[in-house]
Image (cartoon, rainbow, N blue to C red):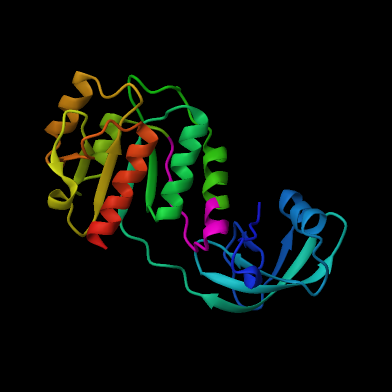
Amino acid sequence: MPAVPAWPQDSGVRLFVDRQLAEGDAVWIDGAQAHYLLGVMRLKAGARLKLFDDVSGEWLGEIVRAGKRDLDVALLERIRERESVPDLWLGAAPIRRARYDWVVEKACELGVARFTPVMMRRAVVDRVKHDKLRAHMIEAAEQCGRTALPILDSEMSLKEWLTAIGNRPLYFADEAGGAPMRDAMTPGSAAILIGPEGGFDDGERDLILAHPSTVRISLGPRILRADTAAVAAVAAWLALTQ
């Protein structure tokens, strides 16, 4: 759903479009997006809005035709290039759905480049709803002025994800403790791994610690829930390295 930021009031409606945009394009919008623009926001022909596509940046558009269930938007000019995104991957075990949706939202808001549901023995669910997670990412990007979306992977096993990250530093938020984040985290490519609500089992911890680029980190003296830990670790990495 397109978002209307609360402030500044003149920032207008922002809408993600799942196709590459270019100058002079006419963009046809239907379905739920059209219902929101026409039925909820009551936009008419001549109204302006902002479109972004995760590829070319953000564009100023004007509604040139407003029907009952669809509309056409003409692109007037590109406002911004696609933003630069830090090369940070977040792997997180699925937890209860509402809280996992929240993690995905915040990962997008903070600027994670890639998000992967990593299946572990104590994960709450066997599968995640990929379409729902992407919808949460899109909504967060619309509301927060993002012009880039994280890559959203399908579920991977822990072994598959460890192979996929290659030799990038893996910051492992281990319940058993590790180095303070301010000492451990460095600029450049990175991956962060957050476990399930029940924690890692012994076999998973051994597999992670055997990975050659693993760096055990501590998120502080307090026990954090999985969703809190994910946001805390990503925010810390961004604050310390960017």
Question: Residue 21: where, in percent of width, then height?
Answer: 59, 68
Question: Residue 183: where, in percent of width, then height?
Answer: 12, 51
Question: Residue 37: where, in percent of width, then height?
Answer: 75, 58
Q: Is residue 188 or residue 180 the one in the foreground? A: 180
Figure label count: 0
Visible residue check, residue 124: yes
Q: Is residue 144 magenta?
A: yes
Which residue is rendered at x = 46% and y = 35% of the image?
100
Which residue is rendered at x = 32% and y = 38% of the image?
229
Visible residue check, residue 213: no
Q: Is residue 80 magenta?
A: no
Left-right relation of 98 to 214: right
Q: Which residues are magenta?
A: 140-154
Left-right relation of 135 to 24: left
Residue 204, picture quadrant: top left
Q: Looking at the image, is 116 positioned above or below residue 93?
A: below
Q: Is residue 226 or residue 112 the one in the foreground? A: 226
Left-right relation of 175 to 135: left
